Amino acid sequence: QVQLQQWGAGLLKPPETLSLTCAVYGGSFSGYYWSWIRQPPGKGLEWIGEINHSGSTNYNPSLKSRVTISGDTSNNQFSLKMSSVTAADTAVYYCARGLYYCSTGSCSMKLDYWGQGTLVTVSS
Amino acid sequence: QSALTQPASASGSPGQSITISCTGTSSDVGSYNYVCWYQQHPGKAPKLMIYDVRNRPSGVSNRFSGSKSGSTASLTISGLQAEDEADYYCSSYTSSSTWVFGGGTKLTVL
């Protein structure tokens, strides 16, 4: 059974850098995309970005200038760094596995396994 | 990218059916059949309920079904049960190789 376990600093001051890591257990790191998603308190989900096992990344255009996602294939982990945080970055941050594949003329895409979430609070 | 549009709330009585809509654009829902629906209970991580518009992951009840017409996707829950009370989010892959989520719908089982 695939499990995603995430961790990182939960309290930051502006304009520090947010840093979170997500470890993948019970499954392969290769062949998937690995995403970060966040959810401000009482609000909806916002996709931050993703990386695949080859290091190829895609980012939400609204966050791209401040976000870096990196992967560590040897340890089945991937990380999120977000610079110059403000109170608006206060949220629960989730990591998730993206399964994208095509076979016999049809394709499929989904975020099927999620981490438990990490609350990051930004306050001066 | 703009969030997909969902109703803020929905409600139904046990045993009834409800449908939640998710409206996007020609850059996301209208162009791709990569629409997912997630269920989120308070304090929990989202759970995948529907993927590729209408497919259910193993273990998800067949009371949950999905469909799409044009740029609007829909989630239907039949035979409402108390445990279905949760927030529901749609998401779609986009032409920019990103994911976009809806604002979420709070489902109340009366």
Image (cartoon, grey):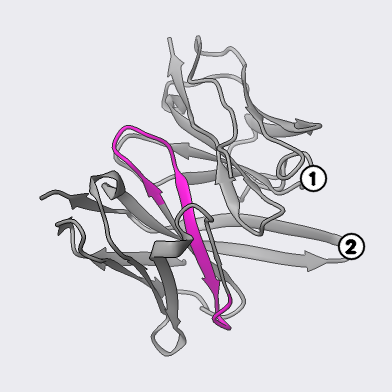
Q: Is residue B22 left or right of residue A18?
A: right
Q: Is residue B59 visible?
A: no
The number of numbered discs placed on residues in the rendered structure image is 2
Classify the position of the N terminus of chain B by image quarter.
Answer: top right
Which residue is the site of mark 1?
B31
- Could you say where residue A5 lies in the image, as x and y percent from the top left? 33, 66
User: Mark 2: which secondary structure?
Assistant: loop
Image quadrant in which you'd find residue A55:
bottom right
Residue drawn 23% across and 46% down?
A87
In the picture, measured across the screen, residue A114 lies left or right of residue B54, that is left
Q: Amino acid at mark 2?
A: Gly
Farthest residue, direction right: A105
Front residue of B65/A124: it is: A124
Instruction: Report if residue B54 lies within the magenta region.
Output: no
Which residue is pictured at 58% across the width and 83% down the height?
A: A54
- The percent position of residue B52, horizontal first and vertical second, equals 71, 47
